[in-house]
Image: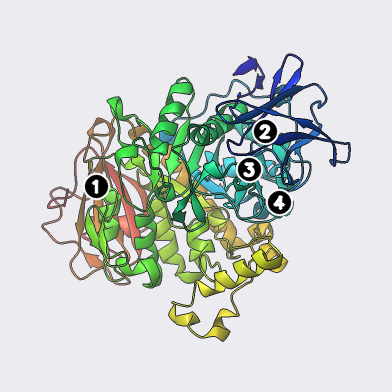
Amino acid sequence: MTLSDDRFAYETLWGPRFVEGGAEFRLWAPSAPSIELAIGDEAGKPSDFLAMEKDEAGWWRLTTDRIAPGGAYGFRLESGLIVPDPASRQQFGDVHSLSVLVDPAAYRWEAPEWNGRPWAETVFYELHTGTFTPAGTFEGICEKLDHLKATGITAIELLPVAQFGGRRGWGYDGVLLYCPHEAYGGAEGLKRLVDEAHKRGLMVFLDVVYNHFGPDGNYLGAYASEFFHEDIHTPWGPAIAYDEAPVRRFMIDNALFWLEEYRIDGLRLDAIDSIKDTTDTPLVKELAAAVRERFPARHVHLTTEDDRNITWHIERGEAGKPLLVSGEWNDDVHHTVHVLATHEQEGYYEDYLKASVSQLARALATGFVFQGDYSAHRDRKVGVSSEHLPPTAFVNFIQNHDQIGNRAFGERLTDLASRRMVECAQAILLLSPQIPLMFMGEEWGETHPFCFFTDFDGELGQAVSNGRRAEFAKFAAFRDEHSRDLIPDPNSLTTFEASSLDWSVLERPNHRRRLAQVRRLLAIRQDVIVPLLNDIPPGCGSYHVADGSLAFSVAWTLKDGQVLHLFANLDDEPWPLPSSLTSTDLTGGHLVHAYPAEADKVLAEGSLPGTSVVFRLAHQSLIAGAVA
């Protein structure tokens, strides 16, 4: 709810709320024999306990004026264990400490009139708060916002910031989903970051995890076993019981909370294929519908990660507007580019062909590579047809946190492929009509790794370290146990430190040149491509693939019938265009971009140089005999 012109709060079902007589504290624990409210002293230590009362729905409640905003509180179980509020907005310390009673309306927004930006304008910049700057905080990000705006970024996407065990980690082990990580700057720091971004015209997206909780600090099972299904297993333990109304509301409220109380512009829903929902209505469907209903006047967007290649959640309605989710992360595009650039084919890369660009062309033109096709890696058919969807239903990338960090040594594409191949891939990413995403440092060709890192100790820490190395035993380079010992220990501080961006490299000519190129491409995108991304007809893409070459062309019919053409040759040798491919003069329309600069002149003569990309825009298709 909007409390005033510059104050915002969202009233959640879980967590405390201010009422007459103080604050009402609530906890759902249907089978708990008793719950007491723990009152903390100035040092955040429990100093007194008040009995709570349970209603028929399993909610324990107590209203008291003994805890003021900024005061510490928690809950004591019958066993004597004292736990934080699972809907804590702030912690007194880490995930094991007492929670802090927060007045969400205390922050006064400096850009309260911000209404977001249209989806078509989105250019994502995915970043990890702890390694993006030397400070590793939300304040550190604020200091780099002008750099991002000047680059052409329109949306920063934060890896999960919900409080997790330890001080450093990727964030996907969050356990207090309403609480911004204290090591990053907490609630106040995140609000200020969003405010500063909005003042510069930048959107802020947040990665949220609704498929599991982390292993350190998740006390829900100690008092609300009903929150999980012990008989339904996931890679992280028992599945979340989304058939329980309070559990379902916990997550849907969480999404609305970030969007309203923190003025976040959009959410990325992590691995929705791992949400084990036993109800008739998928959680994502209900959550997305709630978001659309609550924010009809704001540009609020949702994206998803899902390896099933499904489309029901990204379908379009009237005038091509998203009905539920704005865009799906398209791993297929990344995988095809990666295999073409590096020739790797282990793991899930075995499904992608190192000697063919047909899969990349298909994905760029029609969405997924696997649209009901057989996957050797998964030994089953995967996906459904996606060719009816507009390109903007997909978020494309050639690097992201997963695809870099899940490598043994966290290498970036810059270290794995030739400079020309990377620059061709980057041009394809930034000028194609799909929504592009870059990972932090990609704009200048960062070579520092981004490794998997955590901050666990004891048995859990050892299990994570051992498990990380065991994951790579199936890869040829790590079948020998001694070779696996070289893989960085995720719990080592040096692994975290090695993953931090090196901003000093911007002083070097080669990195400055790459940054200038990216800025030019993104300027072209906003000036030329973005105005054409509305009112796109269904099935707008077609493609042609060369025989015996790594060359292809794609044509997208966009707004007002204008056709964007991509000609790409990822081979070392020139590609003589077959006479059957062109129905008109290849100089038709106007040049959008050519890499290298002379590639368009050579194309006009009927050939495409090795490792080159040309984009042209025309009022008709320049390609004949293409696959729709």
Residue 223: assigned label: 3
Element at badge 1?
Answer: strand
Measure the C-alpha gap from mark 2 to mark 1: 42 Å
Q: How would you rate the neighbour count of disc 1 (Cα within 10 Å): few for under 14, some for 14-19, many for 20 or more?
A: many
Question: Which residue in the protein does label 2 denote?
Answer: 191
Residue 558: image location, x then y, percent: 27, 37
Measure the C-alpha gap from mark 3 to mark 1: 57 Å
* Residue at the spot 59% in from the left edge and 29% down from the top edge: 263
Question: Which residue in the protein does label 4 denote?
Answer: 136
Residue 377: assigned label: none
Q: Amino acid at mark 4?
A: Gly
Question: Which residue in the protein does label 1 denote?
Answer: 555
Element at badge 4?
Answer: loop
Element at badge 3?
Answer: helix
Q: Amino acid at mark 1?
A: Ala
Q: N-terminal of the two: label 2 or label 1?
A: 2
Q: N-terminal of the two: label 4 or label 3?
A: 4
